[in-house]
Image (cartoon, rainbow, N blue to C red):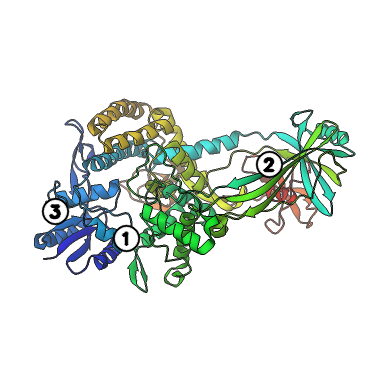
Amino acid sequence: MKNLVIVESPSKSKTIEKYLGKDYLVVSSKGHIRDLAIKGKGGLGIDIENGFIPTYVVSKEKKDVVKDLKKQVKDADKVYLATDPDREGEAISWHLAQELELDVNDNNRVVFNEITKDAVVDAFKKPRTIDMGLVKSQETRRMLDRLIGFKLSKLLQSKIKSKSAGRVQSVALKLIVEREKEIKAFIPVEYWTLDAIFKKDNIKFEATLSKINGKKAVINNEEEAKIAYENTKGEFEITSINKRVRKKAPKLPFITSTLQQEASTKLGFSAKRTMSIAQKLYEGIELSSGLEGLITYMRTDSTRLSNTFVTNAQKKIEEDYGKKYLGKYKIKNEEGTQDAHEAIRPTNLEYTPDSIKEYLNNDQYKLYKFIYYRALASLMASASSNTVAVVLSNNGYDFNANGTQLTFDGYLKVYSDYETSKDVILPELIENEKLTPESITPNQHFTEPPLRYSEARLIKELEEQGIGRPSTYALIIDTIQNRGYASLEKSTETSRTKVFFPSEQGILTTEKLDQFFSSIINVKYTARMESELDEIAVGELDNVEALTEFWEKFVPLLEEANEKMEKIEPEKTGEKCPECGSELVIRVGRFGKFISCSAYPECKYTSNLKKEEKEEPELVGKKCPKCQSELVKRKSRYNTFFHGCSSFPKCNYMETLDGEEIVPKAKRRKKK
């Protein structure tokens, strides 16, 4: 029979089979075929007493898949395992070898970073054995997640009705909850600025107070602002002009985390959506020439580019834009980076986004274009600007004005859709020249609390703190929301970006974990675990040693929590069950709160919770100065009160309880 090749994805199998030809049959395992058993002591599938020996079982939904694979293996001359080039893929290959009775010492493991004909054919010329270091690392991660997830989830379900906890999930939730508490505790501090407008040669420009008598300008209140205003009347002298050339270097090509962050902020894609689109671009799109993988593997934390790609890209840059647009190849990999494969880049520069647009849906086109030009731009020259920093002084008060003018677009030639360079033109100014401002305006400001986490900001924080792996971020974010611990909502902080708001259950879950498990559910310990998994992968740490150390730390905490964590009883409704006469209580289910019989599971009576009637806003006896509707008393997100127009959102007038108008943040920015 033919050579049998087993991959993970059915769509990927078609692309690879086309490249390998008629002597190869490419089939799919459809992902993982086995997982830890849920039988045995504690339902863990792990024999802890005898050195953390895992017990694996074929997943119920994969039994038919495995049955078919076994038949095909029997008829094959040679079997190749060509799952994804990462720890998860290595583990899938090992599970396949175990279940299909293949020799793990055989050179049957094939790895490629891109699904192109050259890459695939070349990979089959140099198969290797399964990397057991990577397998042990993945296995250790899975066991840690099972131990923490099962034990903590069971505890929280019984004590506080929370649905689950997890090694990384709970730390991500902790970040969201801690940020919310910072915002709630934040007390705004008043400060003022002085902003001047000058004019010369019919060119107006702005300058802002920066120093008073050589020290950083600090104006705390209106009285101090008035003093500064009075002291700056009259002529200003230009005391300093500093001209320089500023270079702006292109960003490095995408890795998983930066792709998720940038796709969120620039394209409005969730992490889950981004990874789903990227998966399809990697596995293959049907073009006029047939199925083609358009990007390299999208789960990577390396910014490395292959020599072939760099050479081809430099040639394209020089031919399309000129030699002056050529930049230098740079690479910056953080400590702990898994450099097994490249950054995310296009597989073939001839497939420009516009040339294959007709074969892509709108989302695929947007993401492919982003990846294509990010990789190309990373090898282009820096953009250059002439900048001018001017100091205008009067009576010991120094005002700063800054101008900038793009002189060479460099990488912005291809990347201007995602980064812009705005010119700020100043007139020709001379040192010691005298100018009188057209106006000087004191402006009141208040310090603002830290921003809530958007998806992009949370992913950036997780990456910087070394929590989890970029390939898991989308799942972590999804889980937090599905468990009802936090929701992504639009906020007054920004009209466009959704941010995380923790739920009451999310806050309670974090508080209880902090109370009893703060030594392991925290940023540092979780990051340390990731480092240990890396050490296991390269053979520098024994996995049983790492698991034993964790377990010995975890068990006493678990025992104490089981004994001391207060059990929250369901809230009573004050009504009796119509079926058995027991108390009715409010429980939290998959779809929110509902009414249930306290005698459950003996009595299975349930009903929907009646929606509380929305409390009517309190009229304050004043008319809105903008539209003459009634003003009402409202509560802000900081739990403070203000007066707002009853016609909101048609009219967004707001004022303090003392009657002073509140200008929305967006309008304050525009005035600046």
Q: Earlier in the sequence, mark 1 or mark 3?
A: 3
**Quick one: quadrant of the N terminus?**
bottom left
Whole-Å distance between the Cαs marked 1 and 3?
Answer: 25 Å
The single residue placed furthest to the right in the displayed view is: 234
The single residue placed furthest to the bottom in the displayed view is: 288
Q: In front: 98, or 378?
A: 378
Count of picture labels: 3
Left or right for 556, reference 424: left
Q: Amino acid at mark 1?
A: Ile
Q: Which mark is residue 641?
A: 2
Whole-Å distance between the Cαs marked 1 and 2?
Answer: 58 Å
Q: In front: 142, or 358?
A: 358
Q: Which mark is residue 115?
A: 1
Q: Amino acid at mark 3?
A: Leu
Which residue position is annotated with label 3? 100
Q: Secondary structure at mark 2?
A: strand
Q: Earlier in the sequence, mark 3 or mark 2?
A: 3
Q: Earlier in the sequence, mark 1 or mark 2?
A: 1
The residue mark sitting in front, 3 or 2, is 3
Left or right for 407, reference 580: right
Q: Position of residue 211 (x, y in %)?
A: 76, 32
Q: Secondary structure at mark 1?
A: loop
Whole-Å distance between the Cαs marked 3 and 2?
Answer: 67 Å
Q: In front: 183, or 438?
A: 438
Q: In front: 279, or 337?
A: 337
Instruction: Determine which quarter of the picture holds residue 228.
Output: top right
The residue mark sitting in front, 1 or 2, is 1
Q: Position of residue 136 (x, y in %)?
A: 24, 40
Instruction: Determine which quarter of the picture holds residue 651.
Output: bottom right
- Tell me if residue 129 can be seen: yes
